[in-house]
Each structure stands twice: as C-alpha cells, then as structure tokens.
Image (cartoon, rainbow, N blue to C red):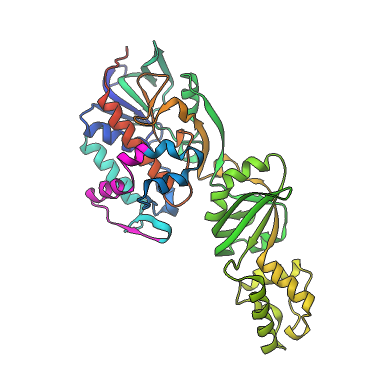
Amino acid sequence: MKNEKIIYDVAVIGGGPAGMMAAISAAKNGARTVLIEKNKSLGKKLLLTGGGRCNLCNAEFDLRELAANYGKNGSFLFHSFSEFGPKETVKFFSDLGIKTVIENKQRLFPKSGRAQEVLDVLTRTLEESGVEVVLGEKVANIKKDDGAIGKLFLAGREIVAKNYILATGGKSYPQTGSTGDGYEWAHRLGHRIEKLSPALVPITIKEAWPKKLAGTGFPDVKIKIAQIGKKIAAARGEILFAHFGLTGPAILNMSGLAALFLKSGPADIFIDILPDKNAGVLEQEILKDFSQNPNRAAKHCLARYASLNFVQALLEQAGIDAEKTCNNINKKERRLIVGALKSVGLSAVGTLGLEAGMVTAGGVDVSQIDDKTMRSKIIANLYFAGEIINVHGSTGGFNLLQSWSTGHLAGTSASAFCGWAGG
C-alpha cells in the first residue's frame, strides 16, 4: 500500500468516538471508507470516559430538553439528535450486544461497567463493515483544489477520497492524542476557530485550608459564583474538594462560564452544603442537639451534617475551638456555625488548563457548518463530527452523545454525497 494512491468514497480523520461512528455509518451506507488514526490504537480517550465505565449517553428523550444541556449552541445539534439521539444510541449498542443501565440523572452506561467492551464492539463493527483502518500515521498535509479537498498526505502515501470527515477531537487529555490538530487543518481550510478554553474543568481557589479536605465530597449542594457582587453562575449537585480547589459534576458544569469571567479577576464561591434546610430550622436543630449533649465536643454534634474533618476545618475558619463543648457555644458562635454550613465562602482564581478539561470549549464556528448534514459551508467535500465543533454539553453522557450523533450524521451525509473526486 506504500506510495500508492487509493481512492475512497469517504476518508475519516480521527479514531475517537465520533470518527468511529462516522466511519461505521458511511460504510454501512455503502461507501468505501478509510479511518485514519495517528495513535497506534483506536478510542484511547473513550476508555477514560465515565471513569472507565463509559457514560454512553444521557437518556433525556425530550430533544428540546436535551439540546438545552449544550448551552447557546445547543440548537445546532437538534437535527442530528432527531436523526440519531438517545433512543437510536441505545438501539445501536443494543443491536451490537451491549446491555445498558440508566443511573442517576439519566446517565446511561453499559451494564458491564467496562468502556473496553464498548471499544471492542466498535472495532469489531468497523471490521465487519469493511472500513479500512490506518493506525499510527498522522496526516502531514491536506491539499485543497478549487474549494474542495483534493487529497491527504500521510507518511509515504496519499489518500484520495470523494468526501472527508474531520473528527479529530479537542485539546483535552493530550496524552490520548487530542492535541488540536484538527483545529489547525480547519483553520488552514478557511474556517473560523472560536477561541479554545477548557470546559468541564476543575476550579482553582486562593485559600489553602481546603487542601486538608482533599477527597472530601458532598453529593448534593447548592453553589453560586459571583464577581463584584454579581452572580455569574449557579448549580446544584455533587462537589469534591481537591488539593488545587474544587471539582465534581456541579463544579465542572459551571466551569466553562466561570473561566471566562475569571480571566478578568477572582470571583467569590458560596457553597450551601445543606440546601434543603433553611437557616432558621438548622439553628433550632443545632440548639436542640447542643442542649441534649452539653458535655460533648461541638464538632461531634455537628458531624451529623458533614464529615468530621470538614466540620473541624469549618469551625477553625469561623474562629471557634472545635474542642469546645456544646454548653460553651454561645448564641453568636452558634449563628456563625449556621452561616458557615449554609455558605462556605471561597475565592476562585482560575481553572486548571486545557489538558485537564474533560472537553474543549471553542472550535469550528457552527455558523460555517450545515447542521442538517455536518457539511462545511466553505469546503464542498468536508464534514465535521464531535468535539472539534464549537458546542459542548454538561457532564452526564451529553458529550459522548454529541459524538455519536454528529458522527452518524456526518458519515451518512458524506456517503450520500460522493460527487467530489480529488486528484
């Protein structure tokens, strides 16, 4: 095959979830398809999704509600979801023998809890569909002729196709091969690339004391971020303290918006660890506990609301001796405790970098892509799929669903419009 020019119907660049789905869809539609991946194996980032369990998608079957989880560009995905949404995703993997389960917040996982199982069935399906897979070879150059791609140059070979699909992912987790190559190619081909920034990324904080709480989590809190007194983001859900600051789904889902504001300076974070208790009720509960346990250390009475290490840290920040017995806590101190539990105050100073984000915000401007086909409005035989497009979702399977959906639409569309031949 070296130094030969082979003509395909569809050439897919990128062997992640979107690229594999695009190649499968194109091949099943009758197209002679090649899938090019610079790594020596497919789906490296897929194996990391869902903590290695692979959160296949979010089972939100109301498509308008679904699109709302993708921010301002969510409407761009509406057509692709109508073609291949959660129901079609479940059926696709079910037909391949993968049983699924729906967990908290409609997150859908393979019943086995193994991302490797998902990758195995995808690679098998690629083979059975007749997709030629080229591994360990990077695209060195792309030739453009008269508003269309003419050929791809790899090491020692040229690949010519009627249509091409860019599914190279973002810049998050570069160790998996997501180094942003596709953005450069898209830019060279005339596309506008919206500024890249980390999304679904942990937030860093100024204070040192939370470092002692690394690994301490809360399953359900209310969190608000404000800058100069103005609320910029709010969420409810799970958080986790880390040595650098805060992470967890509620934090990650706010981080993209927060990152934009943090560029102009720090912001205040307020965490209510007991969102279903108002301050008055909480104070009465604490007063009752203290009255019934007068000689017990206050920290042990308060441990019903949070872990002991968190309570000790919170009391320390409030200037209250954690060893003080309940009968020695005065009214002022009690109200300080209530205030601390209802509004843990921290100062956000930034986020971790692009490499630490679960996905990349920014990318190819959606106004330059036909949402009905995923076809470029600039290059006649180019299509896009997956994270390279400037749209991303919340945590909980939304981003993998975007990859399956846009990959399917791009592959189906590219195989249906094979009128452009390069040379």
Question: Where residue 374 sits: x, y (%)?
Answer: 37, 30
Q: Is 86 colored magenta in this rendering?
A: yes
173 vs 59: above or below:
above
Residue 107 visible to the viewer: yes
Query: Horizontally, is 230 left or right of 393 in the view?
Result: right
| Magenta-colored span | 79-103
Residue depicted at x 74% and y 76%: 334
The quadrant of the picture occupied by the N terminus is top left
Query: Horizontally, is 36 left or right of 187 in the view?
Result: left
195 vs 288: above or below:
above
Question: Where residue 34 sits: x, y (%)?
Answer: 29, 28
Residue depicted at x 66% and y 66%: 342
- Front residue of this view, candidates 397 and 115: 397
- Front residue of this view, candidates 167 and 132: 167
Residue depicted at x 43% and y 35%: 76
Q: Is 25 colored magenta in this rendering?
A: no
173 vs 237: above or below:
above
Question: Where residue 64 sits: x, y (%)?
Answer: 40, 45
Residue 172 visible to the viewer: no
Q: Main secondary structure of the magenta part?
A: helix
Question: Where residue 381 sits: x, y (%)?
Answer: 35, 20
Query: Horizontally, is 33 left or right of 60 in the view?
Result: left
